[in-house]
């Protein structure tokens, strides 16, 4: 009661605003509850959805099309393969977030899991049928693009940030031009260049898989933005830290690895995680180059069936819930890392 009185009802104006916003919130929640829960249709029955249209949501579109939304154009009878591959990759990502797994062998574990992931997805060995990358889609493709883009962009961004602060003019200029050039164009343009323009410069008869081109484009794009975040952390380190490291006789790379970078990265944890979340959401743009991740898979599932075309909103809300779970989890992990960092500073 004391908190309510101090923050929401401390004077007449704030009390009136609080009551007004409270009534609007109750009105909105009651209508959303009626549309999304009470009058909603949960069965995969198009006739029931048409009968309830306008009064309640049709979650039956999710019940009917969830496999296409989650797995895209992957062959129906082989969808156990992307399911197993995705679970394995998510388990690896969770393990990588835990301190007990921060060992030298974690890099080897990444290589092994990725090898199994691509083996399951592509096939061609152990009796698995071949599924080309243009048939990959849905959640497995989203997680693959996001995770590999982040893993590839992070070390590159550190090198770019160090290069921009280098005393060597050539290195500093090259890194600056790269960062400013990439940050000066939208990701859609980079994806178009990687998918349609880049093959024009390749020798005749030589081509690179579109998934690899898109992955490289997203990695380079994410690295440019992340480099500026890390550079901000490097600039926040007092000059005395550099001088103290030099007085100890440390080389440049020893100084960066043991003293400067740990402090700089700890300072910009929120910015780094914000970049990771942005990269995860940017995977929705690969639809324009005919890679059907979650958003593209929904369009593929709904637009191909006239019975469910009118209920795309419910499908988008389902996808939004998936994005929210992943992004909220990343945000909570970021807060955990910040608490660990602050605890170390306190001691």
Image: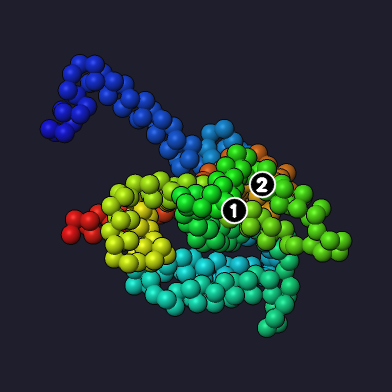
Residue lying farthest to the right in this orientation: 204
Examine the rendering and report whether any part of residue 332 can be seen.
no
Of the pair 286 and 261, the residue shown nearer to us: 261
- Label 1 and label 2: CA atoms lie apart by 9 Å
Q: Is residue 29 above or below residue 217?
A: above
Numbered disc 1: secondary structure? helix
Residue lying farthest to the bottom in this orientation: 126
Is label 1 in contact with label 2 (beta carbons under 8 Å)?
yes
Q: Is residue 306 above or below residue 21?
A: below
The image shows residue 123 at horizontal and vertical percentages of 69, 75
Residue lying farthest to the left in this orientation: 2
Question: Which quadrant does the C terminus fall into?
Answer: bottom left
Question: Which quadrant does the N terminus fall into?
Answer: top left
The image shows residue 338 at horizontal and vertical percentages of 30, 53
The image shows residue 144 at horizontal and vertical percentages of 58, 61
Of the pair 122 and 146, the residue shown nearer to us: 146
Asked which quadrant contains residue 84, the reply is bottom right
Asked which quadrant contains residue 68, the reply is bottom right
Examine the rendering and report whether any part of residue 317 can be seen.
yes
Horizontally, residue 230 falls left or right of residue 303, namely: left
Which residue position is annotated with label 2?
190
Q: Is residue 181 above or below residue 151?
A: above
The image shows residue 120 at horizontal and vertical percentages of 63, 73
At x 70%, y 81%, the residue is: 125
Which residue position is annotated with label 1?
220
At x 55%, y 66%, the residue is: 86
Q: Is residue 212 above or below residue 115?
A: above
At x 69%, y 57%, the residue is: 213
């Amino acid at each position: 009661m004391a908190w309510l009185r101090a923050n929401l009802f401390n004077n007449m104006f704030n009390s009136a605003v609080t009551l007004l916003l409270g009534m609007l919130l109750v009105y909105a929640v009651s209508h959303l509850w009626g549309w999304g829960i009470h009058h909603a249709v949960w069965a995969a029955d198009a006739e029931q959805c048409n009968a309830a249209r306008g009064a309640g949501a049709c979650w039956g579109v999710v019940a009917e099309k969830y496999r296409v939304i989650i797995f895209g154009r992957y062959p129906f009878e082989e969808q156990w393969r992307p399911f197993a591959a995705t679970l394995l990759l998510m388990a690896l990502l969770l393990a990588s977030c835990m301190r007990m797994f921060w060992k030298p062998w974690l890099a080897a574990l990444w290589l092994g899991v990725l090898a199994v992931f691509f083996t399951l997805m592509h096939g061609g060995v152990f009796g698995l049928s071949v599924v080309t990358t243009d048939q990959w889609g849905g959640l497995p493709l989203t997680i693959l693009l996001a995770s590999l883009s982040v893993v590839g962009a992070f070390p590159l961004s550190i090198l770019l940030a160090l290069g921009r602060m280098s005393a060597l003019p050539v290195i500093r200029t090259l890194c600056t031009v790269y960062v400013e050039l990439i940050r000066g164009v939208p990701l859609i343009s980079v994806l178009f260049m990687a998918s349609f323009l880049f093959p024009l410069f390749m020798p005749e008869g030589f081509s690179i898989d579109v998934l690899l081109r898109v992955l490289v484009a997203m990695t380079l794009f994410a690295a440019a933005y992340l480099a500026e975040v890390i550079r901000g952390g490097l600039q926040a380190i007092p000059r005395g830290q550099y001088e103290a490291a030099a007085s100890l006789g440390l080389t440049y790379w020893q100084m960066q690895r043991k003293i400067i970078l740990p402090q700089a990265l700890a300072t910009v944890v929120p910015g780094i995680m914000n970049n990771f979340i942005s990269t995860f959401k940017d995977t929705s743009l690969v639809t324009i180059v005919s890679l059907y991740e979650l958003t593209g898979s929904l369009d593929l599932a709904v637009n191909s069936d006239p019975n469910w075309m009118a209920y795309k909103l419910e499908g988008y809300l389902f996808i939004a819930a998936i994005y929210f779970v992943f992004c909220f989890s990343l945000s909570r992990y970021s807060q955990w890392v910040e608490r660990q960092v602050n605890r170390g500073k306190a001691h």
